[in-house]
């Protein structure tokens, strides 16, 4: 009997050991138990971030825009201030997000204000060259202390943005929305790649990108700011070989624009658009004579430029319809606009609202 009892005790002891081992095997690591996980950012840095992120800030508008598009409820601050016209297409619960600046063109970021917004992580934009990226990110990390800084490759090129969108979606817990945005982007990139490749040089329309309220600043071909013209097969009259490929833009004279005599003019400046048809100095230009001047939709983010980022994804089909409406009759811009705003700007447009945005950009109703 005593032998039998010992066997039973031994069996129970073995079962207890197995149970403890199984529990330890199935229980997440201590990092995950503490509510954290490790990620490798786009500089190859291994960083510990919270398992569940609820507050996110970014140091530049393009990155902030991606976070807003994927998970606006997690965005705790902006690098800019919404204008009244932009707020029309922004759900009211996001109107009060504070502007804490950032480190990009304006270099007006405040570490104190960033930290005061109590983010779980800070997303820092890095450029493709790699020059200075690591030192900049390390400086940010030292200033932010225990708040993890995650480096993400810049999202300024619409043809290269997918990887960064998917990475941000993975990090902030918005994989589904990230994939949906990438699928939308790829759909129209594939279409314009196919159709622009079929254009002969003589079939390409000439386009001038008018910047500033006088329209006399531009960005040449090859510039990130005019990338949608190149992408859809338009011929930018400001050729980069003669104007210089600069991201800051170049000044030109009205005499030069008249000499170029573009078929199409695209602008992001409402003041210029409002007066160009009544300005005699522009009246001899084909684009003006033929009523082919177009204003990028503005709200809540511009579709064509400034900033260049995920917001210009919807600018791909829009620019295609602007320059080659007869080649893109299969694109219903009313439906496309409603889909994009609902899924990524979190604002449901009516048909009439979508038409108002598109007609306000200069598109003809027959080309919507």
Image (tube, rainbow, N blue to C red):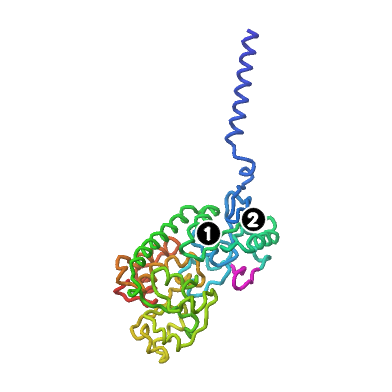
Name, please, the residue furthest toward the bottom: 280
Within 10 Å of disc 1 (Cα), the crowding (few <14, some 14-19, many 20+) is some
In-front residue for pair 164/64? 164
Of tags 2 and 1, the one toward the viewer is 2
Q: Please report the bounds of the magenta region as a residue range.
A: 98-109
The residue at 61%/48% (across/down) is 38
For residue 36, above or below residue 361? above
Is 340 left or right of 246, judged from the image as shown?
left
Picture coordinates of residue 93 (x, y %)?
A: 51, 64
Picture coordinates of residue 266 (x, y %)?
A: 42, 77
Is 304 left or right of 138, judged from the image as shown?
left
Image quadrant occupied by the C terminus:
bottom left
Picture coordinates of residue 79 (x, y %)?
A: 58, 68
The disc at residue 73 is: 1
Going from the N terminus, do you reach mark 2 or mark 1 first?
1
Q: Secondary structure at mark 1?
A: helix
The disc at residue 162 is: none
The residue at 40%/92% (across/down) is 280
Name, please, the residue furthest toward the front: 241
Q: Secondary structure at mark 2?
A: loop
Answer whether residue 125 is magenta in the image: no
Provide the residue designation for mark 2. 148
Answer whether residue 103 is magenta in the image: yes
Image quadrant occupied by the N terminus:
top right
The residue at 36%/67% (across/down) is 196
Picture coordinates of residue 134 (x, y %)?
A: 65, 59
Could you tell me what secondary structure mostly forms the magenta stretch?
A: loop
The residue at 31%/69% (across/down) is 327
Within 10 Å of disc 2 (Cα), the crowding (few <14, some 14-19, many 20+) is some
**Alpha carbons under labels 2 and 1: distance apart:** 19 Å
The total of numbered circles placed on residues is 2
Contact flag, marks 2 and 1 (Cβ < 8 Å): no
């Amino acid at each position: 009997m005593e032998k039998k009892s010992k066997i039973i005790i031994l069996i129970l002891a073995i079962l207890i050991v197995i149970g403890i081992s199984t529990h330890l095997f199935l229980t997440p690591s201590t990092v995950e138990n503490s509510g954290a996980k490790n990620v490798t950012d786009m500089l190859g840095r291994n960083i510990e971030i919270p398992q569940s992120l609820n507050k996110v800030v970014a140091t530049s508008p393009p990155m902030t825009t991606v976070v807003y598009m994927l998970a606006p409820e997690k965005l705790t601050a902006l690098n800019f201030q919404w204008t009244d016209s932009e707020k029309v297409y922004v759900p009211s619960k996001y109107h009060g997000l504070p502007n804490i600046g950032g480190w990009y063109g304006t270099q007006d970021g405040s570490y104190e204000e960033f930290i005061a917004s109590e983010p779980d992580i800070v997303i820092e934009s890095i450029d493709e060259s790699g020059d200075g990226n690591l030192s900049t990110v390390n400086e940010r990390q030292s200033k932010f202390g225990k708040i993890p800084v995650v480096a993400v490759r810049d999202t300024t090129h619409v043809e290269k943005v997918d990887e960064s969108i998917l990475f941000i979606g993975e990090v902030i817990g918005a994989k589904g929305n990230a994939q949906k945005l990438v699928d939308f982007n790829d759909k129209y990139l594939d279409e314009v790649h196919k159709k622009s490749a079929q254009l002969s040089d003589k079939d390409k329309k000439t386009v001038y990108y008018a910047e500033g309220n006088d329209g006399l600043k531009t960005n040449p071909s090859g510039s990130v700011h005019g990338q949608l013209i190149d992408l859809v097969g338009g011929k930018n009259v400001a050729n980069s070989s003669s104007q210089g490929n600069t991201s800051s833009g170049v000044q030109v004279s009205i005499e030069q624009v008249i000499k170029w005599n573009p078929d199409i003019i695209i602008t992001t400046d409402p003041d210029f658009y409002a007066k160009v048809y009544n300005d005699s100095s522009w009246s001899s230009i084909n684009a003006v004579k033929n009523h082919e001047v177009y204003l990028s939709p503005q709200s809540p983010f511009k579709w064509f430029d400034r900033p260049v980022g995920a917001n210009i994804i919807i600018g791909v089909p829009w620019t295609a319809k602007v320059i080659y409406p007869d080649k893109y009759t299969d694109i219903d811009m009313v439906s496309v606009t409603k889909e994009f705003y609902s899924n990524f700007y979190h604002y449901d447009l009516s048909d009439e609202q979508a038409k108002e945005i598109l007609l306000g950009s200069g598109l003809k109703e027959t080309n919507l």
